[in-house]
Amino acid sequence: MNSRDAILDSLRRNAPPVSPLPEAPTAITYADPEKQFAEAFGSVGGKFVRVASLAEVNTELGKFDSYTQAGKIASLIPDVGRANVDLAALKDPHQLEGLDIAIIAGEFGVAENGAVWVPGSTLGPHRAIFVVTQHLVLIVPAGQIVHNMQQAYDRIRLERPGFGIFISGPSKTADIEQALVMGAHGARSCSLFLVGSQAR
């Protein structure tokens, strides 16, 4: 018997007994997932706004100083926001420098933690837009809130090649002197509009 076989044989003889896998914990659910989502999103530094239509989004945006004072605005949702940056015309992502507001679509939200799934295919030609902008606005359809991350992962469908990202509030870090700092690595604020009729 060579040394390789001797080692493998020894490992087999001394292997620990097989243990059954633990049962997966029951995924959390909520009586009112929309309410839980709003609370979770707010708890991570985001601003949650409930509106009935995209037209109402424009009205509510007009109440935000970050929006009314913005010089450069990009919107990936037709008829939402007074966009003055044509993303399709930008050849280099470095041209996004100085972007004040970016308005993008989220596919669904997660009540458990306030995260929003944003498929890469919705970010247009420059996927760095949500990191480069000073202020981020997410638009999510009402009725598209799942209870937990298990349900969220079940919903994700990526084209190949493809990517997506969960966004939960503005950029933040708390690793410096244990002090929470917003906007450390990306958007300084994140507002979310849940659009559609109220759930009955």
Image (tube, grey):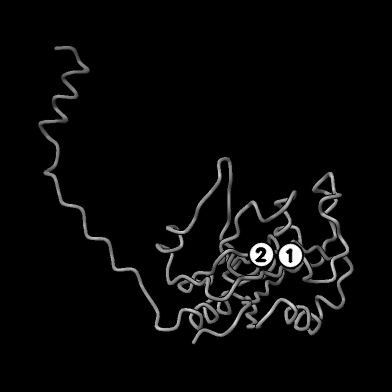
Q: Which residue does the numbered mark 1 point to in the structure image?
A: 77
For residue 153, the mark is none
Q: Amino acid at mark 1?
A: Ile
For residue 197, side relative to residue 63 (left or right): left
Of residue 160 and residue 130, the one placed in the foreground of this image is: 160
Residue 165 coordinates in the image, percent (x, y): 58, 56
Q: Residue at x 61, y 65 (%)?
A: 106
Please say if 71 is above or below 64: above
Q: Which residue does the numbered mark 2 point to in the structure image?
A: 105
Please say if 127 is above or below 10: below
Q: Earlier in the sequence, mark 2 or mark 1?
A: 1
Quick one: label 1, few (<14), some, or many (20+) residues within 10 Å? Answer: some
Q: Residue at x 57, y 70 (%)?
A: 178
Of residue 11 and residue 103, the one placed in the foreground of this image is: 103
Of residue 51 and residue 90, the one placed in the foreground of this image is: 51
Secondary structure at badge 2 equals strand
